[in-house]
Image (spheres, grey):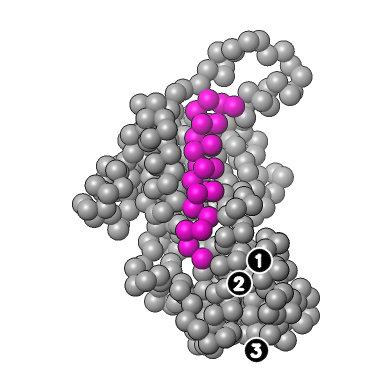
Amino acid sequence: MNVFLCEHLHRDAVALLRSRAEIVADWGRLAECDGLISRNLKLPRETLERAPRLKVIAVHGTGSDGIDLEWCAARNITVTYVPAQNADSVAELIAALALDLMRRVTAADRAVRSGRPVRSAPPEFCGRELAGKTLGLIGVGDIARRAARILREGFGMKVIGYSPSLTPEKVKMFHVEHRPSVIDVMRGADVISLGVHLTGETFHLIGAKELAAARKGAVLINTSRGGVVDEEALYEALRVGRLAGAACDVWEHEPPTAGHRLLSLDNVIATPHLGANTDEALRRVGTAAVQALFDVCEGRKPRCVYSVEHPLGFENRDVLRDGS
């Protein structure tokens, strides 16, 4: 079989793929391919129409926002995904960014490197402890719960959250105090972490209204999808001091341009979609994506499949509503 792959894949996943398939990296040979592995590709129908043999698109991780699922379904192209395998890596990044924002580590580092004199323990870089503060989760999926456990058990944070899928049983199991809306989480949290999929309903979920409701001095972390946040509204909230800081690992358009207004602010930490970018996570996700592709091409039923009815994922008959 021929499999199209033009993005980086962990060496172990590449070795597994090569053991049973020929890897094609030339877009001009897309018509020869039976399968395709996508990390961050945009795959509109105009592109997919060039692949008449295509049976499967294996998404490296989760996120179907760049794929025309309706078109794929009409042509019996299976779209698989890999949930949970990168959850620890993203959760650890959320915890790291929370610490960085609250202790102003990156801002202080920039000041020291600038060459201007920075005295010992300067008041402009006085931070705040995580202990006793409130973590607010918007979306309480697997990643969010793991980040919450790190920050609750490791630093003594209280955890509140909103998700349409939260039941009283899950609230107790996850050690999360339920809030009835996004606005209520914004009002009650010192550290706000976003963990939802990007859909028509969640596009710009965090806009001017939600940011205006935030507790003054709160910080916001987005490791989910860039389009979940109205970046112009976020810029204004940071500029006027409604939010003390923000960490953006994802962007509405990736990579962000050099002139992006958020990059002009000293209270913004900007990273290039690093959430799952660890050796361990890349190995797990990459090999699982390759195995899912093999399952489809060799006539087996893959574990996790996107569909038009379940664009956020369908796994063991449970719809995943939160980012994971």
Mark nearest the camera among 1 and 3 is 1
Disc 1 versus disc 3: distance between alpha carbons? 23 Å
- Residue at x 39%, y 76% (from the top left corner): 309
Q: CA distance from mark 1 to mark 2?
A: 7 Å
315 vs 65, nearest the viewer: 315
What is the span of residues highlighted in magenta in the rendered image? 82-105
Tell me the quadrant of the picture where the N terminus can be found: bottom right
The residue that disc 1 covers is 13
In the rendered image, the quadrant that contains the C terminus is bottom left
Amino acid type shown at disc 3? Arg
Residue 106 numbered tag: none
Answer with left or right where residue 301 lies relative to residue 20: left
Going by the numbered disc 1, the residue's amino acid type is: Ala
Give left or right: position of 89 versus 42.
Answer: left
Q: Are marks 1 and 2 in contact (CB under 8 Å)?
A: yes
Residue denoted by label 3: 53
Query: Residue at label 2?
Result: 290
Helix, strand or loop under label 1 = helix
